Image: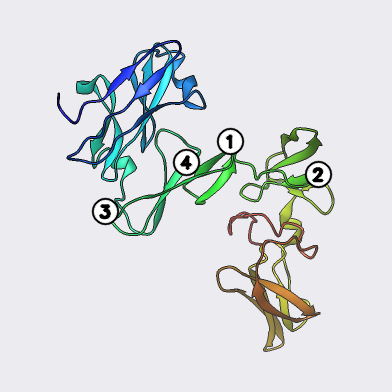
C-alpha cells in the first residue's frame, strides 16, 4: 500500500482516517459541518476551493477539509474535476507584488499580505459580516459602509453622497443606507444633506486657516501689493490641521476622531468637486 494514500471511511455518520504522506509532509482531511458544509449543499460530490489554502471534499453532501501545504494553493482545474492543492498556483493566491494586501479570490472575507514577490502569504480574516476591500486595504461591511459601533446617523467617509443609520438591536446592529441628491453631501453636524461648496474657504485676513472640506489641508493668507492672497497646503500623510486660535494652527496626528470644526471633515471630496469662482 502506498504511503501517500488516505482513506475516508463512512459509517454511522462519518468517521475519518487520514494517512501521513511521508515524502511531502502530513496532509490531513477532517469533517467540517460549519461553515464549509454549505458549499456542498448544491455540489454533494465534488472537490471545491473554499479559500486559497483550504480544499473541501464533498462526499454525499458532507464537507471534509484539507489544508494545502506551504507551497501549494487551492486551484480549480478541469483536469482534476474541480479543486486541488496545486504547487504555486493560482497566481491570484500568490505574492506577485511586494508590500501589498490581496483579497482571497474564493472568499472575500479573507485576505493575505505579501512582504516580497514570491514570499509566503500571511493569511487573515475579516470579522463576520465584513469583506476585504483591496482599494482601501481595509475590512468593510458587505455594503461598503463602515461597521456600526454606536447608534446614530453618519456619512460614508468614502462617498459622503451616501449616509447611513445605526440602530442597536439585542442581537447586534441594524444598518440602513440613504442617498443625498446629486451634488449634495451629508453634513453630520446638521443631520442634513448640503452643498459642501458652501464651505469653500476665502481669506478675510492674514494667518493660517483650516480647509473645511479636507481636514488634512490648510490655507495661508497673506497680503501682497495690497491684495489678500491665499495658498493651500497639506499636512503630512496621517496628520490633520488643528486650530490653536483664529489664524493659528498646527499639524497633529489624525486618529480618526470626529472634529466639529469640519462639517465634511470625514469625507473624501475630490479637489475639482467645487467649481472655481
Report how far apart the C-alphas of labels 2 and 4 lie in the structure.
28 Å
Note whether 147 is above or below 203 in the view shown.
above
Query: Mark 1 near mark 4, Cβ–Cβ under 8 Å?
Result: no
| Residue count near mark 1 (Cα–Cα under 10 Å), binned few <14, some 14–19, many ≥20 | some
Name the residue: 58% across, 43% down: 140
Sequence-wise, the earlier of marks 2 and 4 is 4
Mark identifier at residue 230:
none
Mark positioned earlier in the residue sequence (1 or 4): 4
Dot 3 falls on a residue whose secondary structure is loop
Asked if marks 3 and 2 touch (Cβ < 8 Å), the reply is: no
N-term mark: 1 or 3: 3
Identify residue for label 3.
118
Which label number is shown at residue 151? 2
The circle on residue 110 is 4
Q: CA distance from mark 1 to mark 2?
A: 19 Å
From mark 1 to mark 3, how far is it between C-alphas?
30 Å
Q: Quadrant of the N terminus?
A: top left
Residue at the image point whose x is 75% and y is 47% from the top = 154
- Looking at the rendered image, the disc whose residue lies closer to the viewer, 1 or 3, is 3
Sequence-earlier tag: 1 or 2: 1
**Tag nearer the camera, 3 or 2:** 3
- Crowding around mark 3 (Cα neighbors within 10 Å: few <14, some 14 to 19, many 20+) is few
Identify the residue shown where x is 19% and y is 30%: 4
Instruction: Note whether 220 is above or below 117 in the view shown.
Output: below
Q: CA distance from mark 3 to mark 2?
A: 44 Å
Q: Give yes or no for contact between labels 2 and 4 (Cβ–Cβ under 8 Å).
A: no
**N-terminal of the two: label 3 or label 4?**
4
Amino acid at each position: 500500500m502506498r504511503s501517500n494514500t488516505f482513506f475516508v471511511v463512512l459509517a454511522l455518520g462519518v468517521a475519518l482516517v487520514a494517512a501521513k504522506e511521508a515524502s511531502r509532509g502530513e496532509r490531513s482531511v477532517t469533517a467540517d459541518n460549519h461553515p464549509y458544509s454549505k458549499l456542498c449543499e448544491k455540489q454533494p460530490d465534488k472537490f471545491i476551493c473554499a479559500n486559497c489554502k483550504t480544499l473541501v471534499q464533498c462526499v454525499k453532501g458532507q464537507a471534509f477539509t484539507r489544508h494545502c501545504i506551504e507551497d501549494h494553493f487551492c486551484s480549480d482545474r478541469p483536469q482534476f474535476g474541480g479543486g486541488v492543492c496545486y504547487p504555486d498556483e493560482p497566481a491570484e493566491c500568490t505574492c506577485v507584488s511586494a508590500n501589498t494586501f490581496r483579497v482571497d479570490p474564493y472568499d472575500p472575507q479573507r485576505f493575505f499580505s505579501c512582504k516580497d514577490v514570491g514570499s509566503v502569504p500571511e493569511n487573515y480574516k475579516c470579522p463576520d459580516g465584513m469583506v476585504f476591500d483591496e482599494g482601501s486595504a481595509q475590512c468593510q461591511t458587505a455594503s461598503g459602509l463602515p461597521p456600526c459601533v454606536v447608534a446614530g446617523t453618519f456619512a460614508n467617509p468614502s462617498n459622503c453622497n451616501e449616509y447611513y443609520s445605526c440602530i442597536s438591536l439585542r442581537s447586534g446592529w441594524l444598518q440602513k443606507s440613504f442617498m443625498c441628491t446629486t451634488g449634495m453631501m451629508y453634513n453630520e453636524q446638521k443631520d442634513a444633506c448640503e452643498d459642501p461648496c458652501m464651505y469653500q474657504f476665502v481669506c478675510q485676513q492674514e494667518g493660517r486657516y483650516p480647509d473645511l472640506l479636507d481636514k488634512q489641508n490648510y490655507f495661508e493668507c497673506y497680503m501682497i501689493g495690497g491684495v489678500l492672497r491665499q495658498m493651500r497646503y497639506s499636512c503630512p500623510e496621517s496628520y490633520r490641521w488643528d486650530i490653536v486660535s483664529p489664524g493659528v494652527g498646527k499639524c497633529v496626528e489624525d486618529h480618526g476622531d470626529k472634529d466639529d470644526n469640519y462639517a465634511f471633515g470625514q469625507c473624501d471630496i475630490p479637489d475639482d468637486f467645487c467649481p472655481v469662482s
